[in-house]
Image (cartoon, coloured by chain):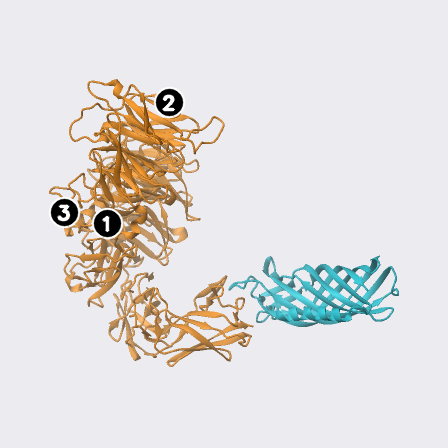
Chain colours: A orange, B cyan
């Protein structure tokens, strides 16, 4: 089991800045049983939970209505496992009793008839470890889901079936001794003694189980009621899986210990960063919602009580309260964490409605009303990252806002703190919902780049772990190049797709492939990968993207034309892909072979969807480091292997084997790339076709990325994570530097655990170079180093219709030349006042920007502006001459941005009747309500400042009341104000067309305000 | 729609008032086959018009002279609108109501088992577009299929055979050609598009009538 440098880095950064505030509140109710619970069975028919009290030799019966122990059923010694028959008539108890000296008569099963509490016992001879009921299936029939079913009984040496009606116990199979004997040392938990767990699928047809849990080799098995077949597989994992099994509804997937398996025993997903625990683990499927609830030990989970308000001395845990996770049932992506009162240490059962979870825990059982989680206090932020940008043209304090809310709509208290000088948060405490404004004093930030500051958010009542909000303070100087696009999360790989003018980014923490448009640099879509995606490659035909996942046996495959996932490729058992590369012949994967902890190369067959481990790498052993990487040459002729220990190898597609292996250097890390000219780069080292080192490239610190663009390429490096990156476009692979240029922020750099990084993607189709950097990625113009002429403004127009009439608060388009080095749009709210190193200044004040490019900038005029004004634009190349224009009190203009079929540039006038644009084929009718989107209507009441979002529930009205006419008819106005939930320059008019309006193929629709008017022709039918 | 209802009431009232004066009452069913009009526009050429569809209605006739009778007809026609150009088709639900008065000349005198007859007359036709309008309609460069109704004057002619099935009960096999100007508010020409002027709606039908 390995874990990930980026995650660790972020976690440790958070720790060093400030401890995470701890909540006082936890979710769930503990029911203490006065002993050690070993198993539970939920009887929904009677509203009872049966709890096997292993050490008190009884079955405690808990009412699920009151969550109190009502009665207890005394049974024979050491009730280790429980199972309720399918019809809830029988409760079967397995008594372990593997004592020293042996007491064979104590190894028995107790069958309790629940209607009268009569008990029958069956001697098993060997200690019984676990029991589970399955639906009985006749030889030629379907499963009997209403009957009691039969029980599968697992002992230390065999599998049996027990018919509860007849009491007949039959052998299914035998196995080697699985368990330990009592007495055991203190403290030892029932799970450690039994080392076995079984669970049945929701439909009763499949039982999954694990034996020998907690030790080296473990047995995982499935019993299929439909075929009366038992399948088993030996499994070794590190750390070993604890005996916890939960199964989805049809038995096709099971969570065993900390591993999600499919019916072929393939590892769909491993929980990342798991740590060894003697007893902490428990989970349950919610198949209806595609989630798994559970607790799995990692560095954030305490190993055991006492659970205090601050981490124990010497603890590696960042919190001291356990948490219940909500995970996706396909790749274990954690979507939520809530603090719980104590560790889950055994079986976890979800009721059939999916509303209540019952988990064996430290004191007995903890009840989690997961269906009522909305009623518990929680905190959530609408931003993962809050980005605040300053520019060289505006060093005044800047602000950015985000919203804290309770997903359930409760009033939840919060506090926000940061130890970073120059950052103030207002309010720093309060109740949800709240808009929190972060103010940055750029003077306090000496680093010319981006600094990541963690905002610590706490609450005394919230039960959830509030995801830390990352405050990114971008404070570049004018000599630094590039425009930052914020992409939250841990980004591990980037790959250009020239043919489609896209680029692909792997977001490891969310298990996503994010696809971006090369022209707009906006995300097109995010697709789900396997667990912990690390690296990717494109198939040689360019139709598929393959992603290696560090914690999954699956290679994720995506159809790049359809932008859809297709069937994954399964690596050999125990192999987990780390790096992947394609050639004209083979697709190779560097996998972590769990069997011996080494890296091995597997070969994929994309057509057959198969993967095989190469027996040897040509004449060399197939044995590498698990963190080695592969890089394919663009022409598909070679694949380079780079190992952190200094080894390099070369796969030749023509020879279909490894033709070179050398170990001339003692260590390798950083950038890696292969060219189409038989040259290779690893770190700053250059290798020839025989992988003989040819010297080093001139670089500025640690290399982060290298991308060939022919014989040369782009190299990205940085002295450290806290300094600006340096990029250079090397025309040849020599030690000469070529115009090293500072980048606006630091690139992603290698770590001790993630030795190699690929962070540069040239996009000739878009004229840009994309680099993975601190905030997400940075867009650089491909001629970033060229001298640029000062900007010039040619015209200022209304952004809606291109007219020259503009108004306060209105959206405008500024046309000119050299306005920005890059084309960048933003979805950031509030709008930034600097983008792509450009800022637009009106009467000395930077104004909010929406889009910048070389010839056009879209922006919003402030509300406090009118009459003759002066505008200039600032770029690293200089400041434009002033451009003077007039701002009217109002200048209504309807957006000409609608589209219908091939028709574009249509006025954004909609018929409320069918929600479609008004066109000649969708004409205005008498009685229609028209919804018109426009800008330039001037101030509103209440006022929403420029650059801000109009609150989704806020209705405003424009101060200068408009009038509307259609031909000779006046229109009734229902609403004229800002569009709720959108940027404040966007206005909306709802108007009623009178019946009897004059029909015509081109009737003028006139919108008038005191400051101006606009007219559009529409077709009217009566 | 209210106009249609009034018309039907008028027919019923007329029938009641004429009862007992050598009258014939009939119901008809058939199908309407409409001609298309050619459309020329800067975007190319197209055809526009109405789809064939079912037709049914009724009539009341008065035997005026040995060879002449007069009839008032109502027909409902289900005819969807269309504009076709190349392989692209635009469709829109539609129907029409027809009310007309015809003079019929019968070859045989009254009381014959079989009569041939010719008809000529006139009235009005209400075209209706009933489909769902959308911002984009294929072939929009030629015209717009519109949710509206338009009344047009109509002339018609036709012919048929009349058989006596049993005393007072007759079967008629006949056709009419309803001729109207093209309804340019229902299929509205796009700017620059030129449409044919006349629309023919040939309706073969079978009728059962009772004569008193």
Give the alpha-carbon distance from disc 3 to disc 1, as whole Å.
15 Å
Q: Please give the label number shown on residue A465.
A: 1
Disc 2: which chain?
A
| Same-chain status of marks 2 and 3 | yes
Name the quadrant containing residue A114.
top left
x and y percentages locating residue A236 in the rendered image: 28, 29
Q: Crowding near pointer 1: few (<14 within 10 Å), some, many (20+)?
A: many
Quadrant for the N terminus of chain A, please: top left
Q: Earlier in the sequence, mark 2 or mark 1?
A: 2
x and y percentages locating residue A205 in the rendered image: 41, 32
Quadrant for the C terminus of chain A, please: bottom right
Residue beneath disc 3: A310
Disc 3: which chain?
A
Q: Crowding near pointer 3: few (<14 within 10 Å), some, many (20+)?
A: some
Residue beneath disc 2: A167
| Left or right: A646 as drawn, with respect to A650 | left
């Amino acid at each position: 089991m390995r874990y990930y440098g980026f995650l660790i880095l972020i976690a440790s950064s958070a720790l060093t800045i400030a401890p995470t505030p701890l909540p006082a509140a936890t979710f769930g109710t503990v029911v203490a049983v006065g002993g050690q619970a070993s198993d539970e069975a939920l009887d929904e028919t009677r509203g009872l939970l049966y709890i096997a009290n292993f050490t008190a030799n009884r079955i405690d019966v808990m009412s699920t209505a009151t969550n109190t122990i009502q009665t207890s059923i005394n049974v024979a010694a050491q009730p280790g496992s429980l199972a309720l028959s399918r019809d809830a008539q029988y409760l079967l108890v397995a008594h372990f009793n593997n004592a020293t000296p042996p007491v064979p008569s104590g190894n028995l099963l107790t069958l309790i008839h629940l209607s009268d509490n009569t008990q029958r016992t069956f001697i098993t001879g060997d200690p019984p470890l676990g029991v589970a009921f399955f639906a009985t299936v006749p030889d030629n029939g379907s499963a009997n889901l209403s009957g009691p079913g039969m029980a599968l009984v697992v002992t230390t040496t065999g599998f049996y079936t027990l018919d509860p009606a007849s009491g007949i116990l039959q052998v299914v199979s035998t196995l080697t001794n699985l368990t330990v004997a009592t007495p055991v040392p203190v403290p030892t938990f029932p799970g450690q003694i039994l080392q076995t767990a079984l669970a049945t699928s929701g439909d009763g047809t499949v039982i999954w189980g694990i034996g020998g849990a907690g030790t080296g080799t473990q047995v995982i098995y499935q019993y299929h009621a439909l075929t009366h077949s038992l399948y088993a597989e030996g499994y070794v994992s590190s750390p070993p899986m604890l005996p916890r099994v939960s199964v989805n509804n049809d038995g096709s997937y099971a969570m065993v210990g900390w591993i999600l398996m499919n019916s072929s025993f393939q590892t769909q997903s491993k929980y990342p960063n798991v740590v060894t625990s003697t007893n902490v683990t428990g989970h349950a499927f919610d198949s209806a919602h595609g989630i798994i609830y559970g607790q799995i030990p990692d560095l954030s989970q305490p190993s055991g009580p006492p659970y205090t308000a601050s981490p124990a001395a010497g603890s590696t845990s960042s919190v001291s309260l356990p948490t219940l996770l909500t995970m996706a049932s396909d790749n274990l992506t954690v979507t939520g964490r809530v603090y719980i009162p104590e560790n889950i240490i055994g079986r976890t059962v979800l009721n059939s409605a999916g509303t209540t979870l019952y988990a064996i825990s430290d004191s007995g059982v903890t009840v989690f009303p997961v269906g009522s989680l909305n009623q518990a206090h929680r905190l959530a932020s609408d931003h993962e990252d809050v980005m605040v940008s300053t520019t060289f043209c505006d060093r005044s304090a800047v602000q950015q806002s985000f919203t804290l809310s309770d997903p359930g709509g409760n009033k939840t208290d919060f506090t926000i703190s940061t130890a970073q000088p120059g950052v103030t948060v207002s309010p720093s405490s309060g109740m949800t919902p709240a808009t929190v404004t972060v103010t940055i004093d750029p003077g306090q930030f000496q680093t010319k780049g981006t600094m990541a500051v963690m905002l610590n958010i706490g609450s005394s009542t919230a039960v959830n772990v509030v995801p830390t909000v990352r405050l990114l303070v971008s404070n570049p100087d004018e000599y630094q190049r590039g425009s930052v696009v914020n992409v939250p999360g841990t980004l591990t790989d980037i790959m250009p797709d020239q043919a489609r003018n896209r680029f692909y980014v792997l977001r490891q923490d969310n298990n996503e492939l994010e696809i971006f448009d090369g022209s707009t640099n906006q995300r097109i879509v995010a697709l789900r990968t396997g667990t912990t995606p690390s690296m990717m490659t494109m198939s040689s035909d360019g139709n598929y993207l393959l992603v290696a996942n560090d914690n999954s046996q699956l290679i994720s495959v995506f159809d790049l034309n359809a932008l859809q996932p297709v069937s994954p490729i399964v690596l050999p058992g125990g192999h987990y892909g780390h790096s992947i590369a394609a050639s004209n012949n083979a697709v190779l994967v560097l996998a972590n072979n769990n069997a011996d902890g080494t890296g091995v190369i597997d070969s994929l067959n994309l057509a057959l969807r198969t993967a095989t481990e190469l027996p040897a790498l040509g004449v060399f052993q197939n044995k590498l480091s698990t963190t080695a990487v592969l890089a394919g040459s663009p022409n598909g002729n070679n694949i380079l292997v780079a190992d952190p220990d200094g080894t390099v190898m070369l796969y030749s597609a023509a020879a279909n084997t490894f033709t070179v292996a050398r170990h001339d250097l003692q260590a390798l890390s950083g950038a890696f790339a292969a060219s189409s000219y038989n040259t290779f780069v690893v770190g700053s080292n250059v290798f020839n076709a025989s992988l003989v080192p040819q010297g080093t490239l001139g670089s500025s610190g640690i290399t982060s990325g290298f991308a060939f663009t022919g014989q040369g390429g782009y190299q990205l490096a940085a002295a450290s994570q806290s300094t600006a990156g340096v990029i250079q476009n090397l025309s040849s692979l020599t030690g000469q530097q070529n115009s090293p240029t500072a980048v606006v922020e630091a690139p992603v750099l290698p770590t001790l655990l993630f030795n190699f990084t690929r962070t540069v993607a040239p996009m000739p189709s878009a004229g840009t170079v994309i680099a993975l950097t601190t905030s997400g990625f940075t867009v650089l113009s491909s001629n970033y180093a060229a001298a640029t002429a000062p900007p010039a403004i040619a015209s200022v127009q209304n952004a809606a219709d291109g007219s020259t009439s503009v108004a306060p608060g209105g959206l405008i388009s500024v046309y000119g030349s050299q306005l920005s080095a890059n084309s960048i749009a933003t979805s950031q709210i509030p709008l930034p006042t600097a983008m792509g190193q450009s800022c637009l200044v009106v009467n000395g004040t930077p104004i909010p920007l929406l889009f910048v490019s070389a010839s056009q900038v879209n922006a919003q005029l402030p509300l406090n502006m009118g009459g003759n004004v002066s505008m200039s634009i600032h770029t690293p190349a200089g400041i434009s001459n002033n451009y003077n224009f007039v701002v009217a009190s109002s200048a209504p203009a309807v957006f000409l941005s609608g589209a219908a079929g091939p028709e574009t540039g249509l006025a954004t006038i909609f018929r409320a009747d069918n929600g479609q644009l008004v066109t000649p084929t969708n004409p205005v009718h008498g009685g229609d309500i028209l919804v018109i989107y426009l800008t330039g209507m001037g101030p509103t009441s209440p006022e929403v400042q420029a650059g801000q979002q109009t609150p989704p529930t806020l209705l405003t009205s424009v101060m200068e009341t408009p009038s509307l006419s259609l031909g000779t008819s006046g229109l009734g106005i229902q609403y004229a104000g800002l569009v709720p939930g959108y940027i404040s320059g966007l206005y909306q008019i709802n108007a009623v067309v009178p019946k009897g309006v004059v029909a015509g193929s081109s009737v003028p629709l006139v919108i008038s305000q005191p400051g101006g008017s606009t007219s559009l022709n529409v077709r009217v039918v009566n | 729609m209210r106009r249609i209802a009034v018309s039907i009431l008028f027919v019923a009232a007329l029938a009641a008032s004429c009862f007992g004066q050598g009258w014939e009452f009939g119901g008809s069913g058939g199908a309407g086959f409409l001609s298309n009009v050619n459309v020329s526009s800067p975007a190319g050429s197209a055809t526009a018009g109405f789809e064939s569809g079912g037709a049914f209605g009724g009539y009341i006739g008065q035997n005026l002279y040995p060879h002449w009778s007069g009839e008032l007809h109502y027909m409902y026609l289900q005819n969807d609108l269309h504009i076709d150009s190349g392989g692209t088709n635009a469709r829109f639900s539609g129907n029409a109501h027809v009310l007309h008065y015809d003079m019929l000349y019968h070859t045989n005198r009254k009381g014959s088992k079989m009569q041939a007859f010719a008809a000529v007359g006139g009235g009005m036709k209400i075209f209706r577009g009933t489909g769902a309008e959308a911002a984009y309609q294929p072939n929009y460069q030629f015209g717009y299929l519109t949710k509206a109704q338009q009344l047009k004057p109509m002339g018609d002619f036709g012919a048929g055979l009349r058989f006596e099935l049993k005393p007072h009960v007759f079967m008629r096999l006949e056709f009419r050609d309803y001729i109207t100007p093209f309804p340019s508010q229902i299929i509205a020409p796009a700017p620059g598009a030129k449409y044919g002027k006349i629309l023919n709606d040939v309706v073969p039908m079978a009728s059962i009538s009772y004569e008193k």
